[in-house]
Image (cartoon, helix red, strand yellow):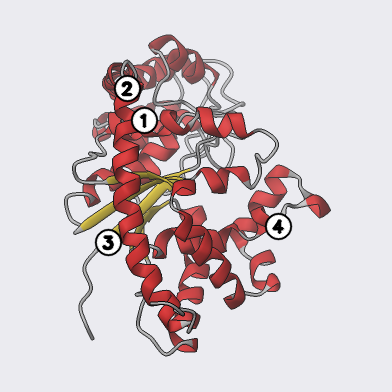
Amino acid sequence: MEKREKIVLTGDRPTGKLHLGHFVGSIKNRVKLQDEASKCFYMVADIQALTDNADNPEKVRNNVIEVVLDNLACGVDPKKTTFFIQSQVPEIAELTILFMNLVTLQQLSHNPTIKTELKERGFGESTPFGFLAYPVSQAADILFCKANTVPVGIDQLPVLEQANEILKKFNATYNVNLFSKITGVVSDIPRLVGIDGGAKMSKSLGNCIYLSDSDVEIEKKVMQAYTDPGHIHVEDKGRVDGNVVFTYLDDFDEDKKGVEELKAQYQKGGLGDIVLKKRLTKVLIDLISPIRARREELAKDPKSIMKILESGIENARKEARKTMIEVRKALKIDYFS
C-alpha cells in the first residue's frame, strides 16, 4: 500500500476559554505533533459550536480569539500549524452535505458521544438536527485536508469511528482511494475529572480550572475540590480513590515519589486536606502562570491574531479546493472542469 504522509487536524469549539482538561487531553499532543507531521491544521469550530448555540452567535464570535490565544500560549505555533475558522472554508460545508448521504439516522442517534452529550444538554425531542449530525460535519472537518491524525479526548473516539465509517463507504461506493484511515491520538490523561469529582472537566458543567485563571482563582478552586467526605479530622484515615486532589497531583505533580508518600500518610491518617490542597495549588500555579503570562501578552494585539487566522484560512481553502476537485470527480458532478 501507498505510504501516506502524516496530516494532523485538531480544533476547539469557541464557546469559552480552554481549561486543564483541554491542555492534557489534546493541546500537549498538538504541540508535539506539529513537529512530527508534514502538515498541521487547527480549526476554530464555530459552525459546530452553533449546533447548540444557534440562538447566541455572539457567544461563539466572541470566543474565537479566546481559544486561539489559549493554543498559542501553550505553544501551538502558527509557523508550523495552520490556524483557520471553520465557517470561512465553505468547502467543508459542501463536503458535509455529500457525506450525509453515506450515514443513516440510526447510526447518528446511536453514536455514544452524541448520546452522552444529548443527555448532558437535556435536548430530548427538541434536538437540533445540526447537533445530531455533527459527526458528519466533523468527518468533513478532518477530511477536507485529507487529515489522518487527530489528537483527541477519549470521549470523542466514537466520532472518529463514525468518520472512518464514512470515509470507507465513500472510497468503496465511488471506487477511489481518496481518504485514508483516521487515527486518534489519545493522551496519557485522556479524561480529566472536574474539581467537583464529576466525570470530566467541562465548560458546560462549570467545574473547570482555566488556563487563563489567576493565582487567586486557582487557589479558590483547588480549595473547593472534592476530596474524601469521610475525612473530617486530620487524624482520620482518608481515601485516595476518587479524591480529586490526589488525581490532580498524580497528573500534574512531577515529584511522583513525594505524592506516593503523601498517599500512604493520608490513608494511615494524620494528613489534612488543606496541606494537600496547598501543595496542589502551587503545582497548578507553576504550570498555568507562564501560560497565562504569554496569553496576556498576545491578547494585547488582537489584530495580529486575526492576521494569523486570515493567512491560515487562505491556506486551508487551497487544500480544500484541491480535495473537492477530486471529490466532485468521484461523484460525477465535475460538470465544467
| Sequence order check, earlier mark of 2 and 3 | 3
Q: Amino acid at mark 1?
A: Asp
300 relative to 97 in the view: left or right: left
Q: Which residue is mark 4?
A: 129
Q: CA distance from mark 1 to mark 3?
A: 22 Å
Q: Counting other residues with Cα less than 10 Å from the Cα at mark 1, is it few (<14), some (14-19), or many (20 or more)?
A: many
Q: Is residue 241 above or below residue 235?
A: below
What residue occupies the far right of the structure in this picture?
125
Observer able to see residue 259: no
Q: Amino acid at mark 2?
A: Arg
Q: CA distance from mark 4 to mark 1?
A: 30 Å
Residue 297, horizontal then vertical, whole percent? 28, 17
Contact flag, marks 2 and 3 (Cβ < 8 Å):
no
- Callout 3 secondary element: strand
Q: CA distance from mark 2 to mark 1?
A: 6 Å
Q: Which residue is mark 3?
A: 7
52 relative to 253 in the view: left or right: right
Residue 174, horizontal then vertical, whole percent? 46, 87
Contact flag, marks 2 and 1 (Cβ < 8 Å):
yes
Question: Tag on residue 295?
Answer: 2
Q: CA distance from mark 4 to mark 3?
A: 30 Å
Q: Nearer the viewer, residue 269 or 330?
A: 330
Q: Amino acid at mark 3?
A: Ile
Contact flag, marks 1 and 3 (Cβ < 8 Å):
no
Q: Which residue is mark 1?
A: 70
Q: Counting other residues with Cα less than 10 Å from the Cα at mark 2, is it few (<14), some (14-19), or many (20 or more)?
A: many
175 relative to 148 in the view: left or right: right
Q: Amino acid at mark 4?
A: Phe
